[in-house]
Every structure is written in structure tokens, then in C-alpha cells.
Image (spheres, helix red, strand yellow):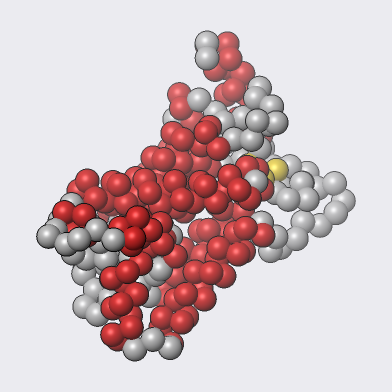
Amino acid sequence: MDKEEDHRAELSARNDTMPHQSDGGREPVFNLAPVVTGLGLLCIAIYTMEALWLNFDQQIWLMLHFAFLPFRYTGPVALDVYALTSPVTYSFLHGSWGHLLVNMVWLAAFGSPLANRIGTLRFLCFWVAGALAAVAFHFALYPSSMVPLVGASGSISAMMGAAARFTFRVDRRAQKPAFTGPVLPVSVVLRSRMVLVFLGVWMAANLVTGLFSGTAVNGPQIAWEAHIGGFLLGFFGIRAFEPGHIARH
């Protein structure tokens, strides 16, 4: 993209960031994309079952088979089918009610406008890609860890990264509010004050989590480093999930 196109993209970002006026109708207060609702309900159902109905031994079995365990790949254990599935299934497990609640709030905020833009199938692929990027980053840092990794945070961080490439512009006038405009060049995005503030706060929150969160005594540990892997996937990889019919200008 040359300088003239880069300038047009920056002007588009500024214009699309301005508040949209209502067309007379009222926007639904809670209007989630169906795929986001479905994924959220799945996460809630799984943790509810785990917290309320499973005993300790059953919870351990759940973690050993469906959480991501780096030791599974580097330790003296035989690889099984869970070595293939756990890099994705871990994203549907959570470590506490608080962990689940925070993730569901961010999923609603960032997932719905992204799903409305790219469609259900692409969004599901994006969820999986974010989960894989998160565990890959985590595994690179802790290849021999025996602590289970759980949570949708990696996939949701990917959604945040994708949102930054639109400078968080959402068309609120649409029946299905979605991120609007082109996927902006990184050079334009990094000149957006809104994006820079968000990135600063997001990084600070992750650092605080890393410094002050301890290893859980009776449950899985939440790894903040995995969020970075997911975010990078969304930030740099969102173009790969864009529908072909969306005009780029």
C-alpha cells in the first residue's frame, strides 16, 4: 500500500470512528451474534457442570484430558488423541466463576461485532486459530510445564487484536452491529490514540496479572502469557478471515 492509499485509510479510520446518528430505530441493548451466544453458553454449561456436579477426582480427569498440558508433549508420556484435541478444548474450560464471567463479558463485547462481520464459519475458525496461537506462545515459554492451561482468553485476545485493526469502529446502525471499514494498515492503526491507549492498558493489565496472580491450590492456573499469542494472531492475521465480498477501500 503506497502513501496515498495509507492516507485514505487513515481518513477512513477517522471518519468511521465518529459516532453514528440513529436512523429512528432503537438498537437492541443485548444483540449478540448467534455463534457468540452458542460458544458462551457452552463455556457456561461446562464450568457449571464442573463446579456443581463433578467431584474432585472427576475434575482432575477433566483437566488431564481436555486442558492443555505442555508436559504431554515433552515428558515421558505416550501421545494420545487428547494431544491433538486439547490445544482447542482447553479454550472451553475455566478456572473459576470470576474467570468465566470476565471472559464472557469480553466475548460479548469483541466477539459479536467480529462474528457479524466475518460470518459464523470463519468466526469458529478464528476461535480455533486464536486458541492455537495462545497455546503455541505458552508452550514456547513453558515447554515442560505440568500446570493445566484453560480458558477462552486466548481466542478472545485474538478478537481484541482484530478489533484494533478496525480501530474498534462498529456500525451501530446496522441490524447486526459489526466492525466496519477496511482492515487498516498497521502503520495507520499505530497512529490511533485510541488503539495506543487500549494497547497500553491491555499490556499493563496482563503484566499485573502475571505479577500478582499465583498458582491455584486446587485448580488450574490461568496463564496471562497466552493472551499475547492470541492477540498477535488476531492483530496480524485478521485479513485471512475476511470474507471476499467485503470491499476494501
Residue that appears at 70% across and 60% down? 31
Q: Nearer the viewer, residue 76 or 36?
A: 76
Q: Position of residue 180 (x, y in %)?
A: 66, 37
Q: Residue at 44% of width from left, 76% of height from top?
A: 47
Q: Nearer the viewer, residue 197 or 232?
A: 232
Quarter of the image that includes the C terminus: top right
In the rendered image, the residue lying farthest to the right is 24
Whether residue 8 is visible: yes
- Horizontal and vertical percent for residue 138? 26, 51
Residue 51 falls in which quadrant of the image?
bottom left
How many callouts does the rendering have? 0
Indicate whether 197 appears above or below 146: above
Residue 23 position, x and y percent, is: 85, 46
Between 210 and 154, the residue placed more toward the observer is 154
On screen, residue 241 versus residue 49, left or right, reads: right
Relative vertical location of residue 197 with respect to residue 175 in this rendering, above or below: above
